[in-house]
Amino acid sequence: MLRKAKRRRRAGYIIPDMFALFLTIVIAANGALADASADEDGKSGVKYAEVEVLLSDNFGVEDSRALPKAPGSDLEFLDNAKRVRAQLPGEEVKALVGRGADITVLRKFVLREGFQTDGVMLDGGAMALASCSGPNEYGENHDNVPIPDAPDSYNCGGWVWSEIGIWNAPGGATVTCVDVHYEIIHSWVGDLIVDLSDEGLSVEYNLFDDMYANWANLDETETGITTFNGEMVNQVWLLWAMDCGYLDSGHIDYWWIKVYYEDIPPPPNDDCSDAIAVSEGVPYSGSTVGATEDGQSSCSYNDTADVWHSYTPNSPGLVTISLAGSAFDTTLAVFDGCEGTELACNDDTCEGLQSEIMMTVTDANTYLIRVAGYWGSAGDYTLTVTNSGCDLPPGPNSPSPANDVNNVSLQAILSWNGGEAYASGGIEATISSEGVITPKVIYGDDDRLDEYEVNDANILAAGDSTVALLSLSDLIDNGDGTFSLPSETYAEWYELADPIGTGNPLCSDEPFRDQPNPAWCSGFLVAPDIIATTGHCACPDDCLEMAIVFGFVMLDANTPVLTIDESQIYYCSEVIARQIGDPDWALIRLDREVTGHSPLGVRSEGAVADGSGLIVIGYPIGLPRKYDAGATVRENTASGYFQANLDTYSGNSGSAVLNSETLEVEGILYAGSAMDFVEDGSCDRSNVCPNTGCPGWEYVTRTTEFSALLGLHKYDVYFESNSPPTELVCSDIGAPMCDPTPEPGASLRPCTIYYWQVVSKNFCGETEGPIWSFTTTSVPGDFDEDCDVDFEDLAELVLYWLENEPSVNITAPDDVIDFSDYAALAEYWLWSDEP
């Protein structure tokens, strides 16, 4: 908010005796008059007042007829010529008061060039200048705003303001006229200056500045103000007040404003129900001028003038919805229906004020696109929707058991694709009870831990897959296959950056103040050559200037790793996709596949459960890797993100947020609701909030917003003894393996031909694999392997006993053929349905 410069005026002046006659004035609802001339800012126009004067011996009919009157107006005599109503210049009213006339001020107005011929006839023939008319928006403010007293007799006390936001006028509507009413409680108004201004202080209008006013309180209405003509209606309007007198006090008590504009017809797609369909790859040109509000977006501010479009994809894929080339500061949001859930939102992109959304879509849905303007702005726009499509998953291969093989174990486990895990199930681990991060967070106590303080191998393995994002120019090539990172400390950086503008250093007990902080964002590995981070950390223009570093940690309390082997440094090859706003995410392809670090598993469907425990791993304020646990999911209703009480700072943007039970990544940290630092006397420290919030929580993009782009596969497996198989034995599994039996440890039927088929699935659709088959092995006692236990098997057994050279491969549990084998054979005959 801009603040007005202090205006100085002379104080402590002497009031002439003649102005004591002001005490006899009957002050009507509109109070006193301001100076009736152009104000000091050079605005043209003369101030007038409509008054009633009580005629007397000192001021009679002829005196009233001699008065200079407003152009186009005349006198109106009342009560058998005992009173007269007239429209007079403000200076003339002051002169009459000086003569002792008994005057009641009815209203004030300003007459400007081009407005002088407008008027309406009043009863009695008087001409009243026309006030504002036409469509308008109204706002009021009841909040008391104290007006500081002047510090001495020669200086003013400083400006204060009260604001009213007008947001519901049609988009692009401009001012044609303004009415304003203000009430100020003050012990002496003669030292007050009262102004009205637009939000940016580009236009100001003086409402009151009368050093001769000798009374308490102001209760005034001024109509017909045209100084603001051409300004945007939808903005914050400001009433300013300053006290330039010593030893008095008061406050702005109440005010209202009516802002008038020309009637503008709304666009044809003003309402969501009238959304205009757009086609892929075909730009649509439209305008939000005249638009009204039908909904709202989460990522902008007062973008009330909106229009709507609908979009039905031709195929699933990654869609870019762009307003590039539009003529104003746009906002963009996508919903799943009118009055539905917001799926994505963007205000500004890396490239500027034009909005853009990247999101995955399916061809089974219709999406509603809301186009609006930041802070009520409006204008012409160009909307383009492009769909990059996506590829079906490759079919399964390399079955195990191999196709058409015999003698397969009755406990066979099906696998394919060489057993490689395409699953998004994450690290299968249970966090041990010893060495786990203490469950404390910044919402209460700040207990972030360094690398050397974490003992749990599973958590450290997850941390090993996170990266610090640095500027390439900050790396120093040592010429021996290593690079050095900047050693400037957190405390040194803070003193130079002064992020909250206090000029204070960090407090001496601030955690990690002596550690280096070269990183500017965080990220984590999600595929062999892809990292995930936030959209605002991955502007395409920054790609060539980005270094992605593994292993930036503290070895102990005093030893940061500042020398990094070149094998641990990777570079940005391309920004695959990104979204800035709500939610906020990006995928960056590296210059080569990563070795020595494993991609983290990410949730690819569903949502984290309410109240789930979380761990965040990242590089807060650019510091070496920090681990913090104990946070929980606090707000879980938005489709693209959730909120949690995570202990995070700037620099944590892009951090992995993991489920504390499974270590599966639930999301990417991208925003917070409170300042990172607060002033504490002569130093600044971290802003520590209670567990109830600051208010609000940290914002985390759900991984399901981008997981479809990682090529993650799911599989369905059909299995039975008939072909083609139709019994679904494994559904939506992530790893290429399946136990076909109904219960763990159960067996397949012996000597049976089984058929099985794997269906590979991803975001784009399904690919059916071939039908494979295998035959299971025989039963115990079937020594001749004809899948039947009969006298031929007994004959084989007897032959072995007699000759010790069986014609079939007879294997007993104890590798000795004796009467126990005969007993096993007999038992099978006794209990088998088909002996």
Image (spheres, rainbow, N blue to C red):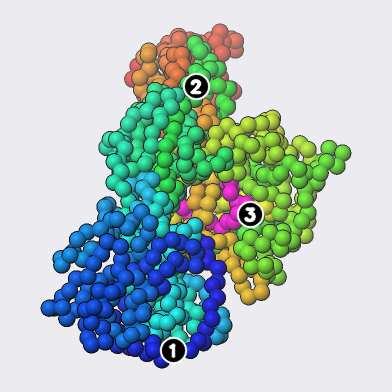
Rendered view: 346 above or below 194: above
**Amino acid found under the numbered disc labelled 1:** Pro
Magenta segment range? 642-660
Q: Earlier in the sequence, mark 2 or mark 1?
A: 1
The quadrant the C terminus occupies is top left
Seen from the viewer's position, the closer of residues 290 and 383 is: 290
**Is 278 contained in the magenta span?**
no
Rendered view: 737 above or below 691: above
Camera-nearest label, 3 or 1:
1
Image coordinates for residue 333, horizontal then vertical, percent: 41, 41
**Amino acid found under the numbered disc labelled 3:** Pro
**Amino acid found under the numbered disc labelled 2:** Asp
Query: Mark 2 near mark 1, Cβ–Cβ under 8 Å?
Result: no
Q: Which of marks 3 and 2 is nearer the N terminus?
A: 2
Q: Is mark 1 on a helix, strand or loop?
A: loop
Outermost residue toward the right in this view? 479
Residue depicted at x 63% and y 54%:
620
Image coordinates for residue 122, horizontal then vertical, percent: 18, 64
Image coordinates for residue 224, horizontal then vertical, percent: 32, 61
Name the residue that disc number 3 marks: 620
**Which is the main secondary structure of the residues drawn in magenta?**
loop
Q: What is the number of the mark on residue 16?
A: 1
Q: For the residues marked 3 and 2, what is the alpha-carbon distance in whole angstroms? A: 37 Å
Instruction: Decide: few, some or many residues near mark 2? Use Cα within 10 Å; few <14, some 14-19, many ≥20.
Output: few
Q: What is the number of the mark on residue 391?
A: 2
Q: Which of marks 3 and 1 is nearer the N terminus?
A: 1
Q: How many labels does the image show?
A: 3
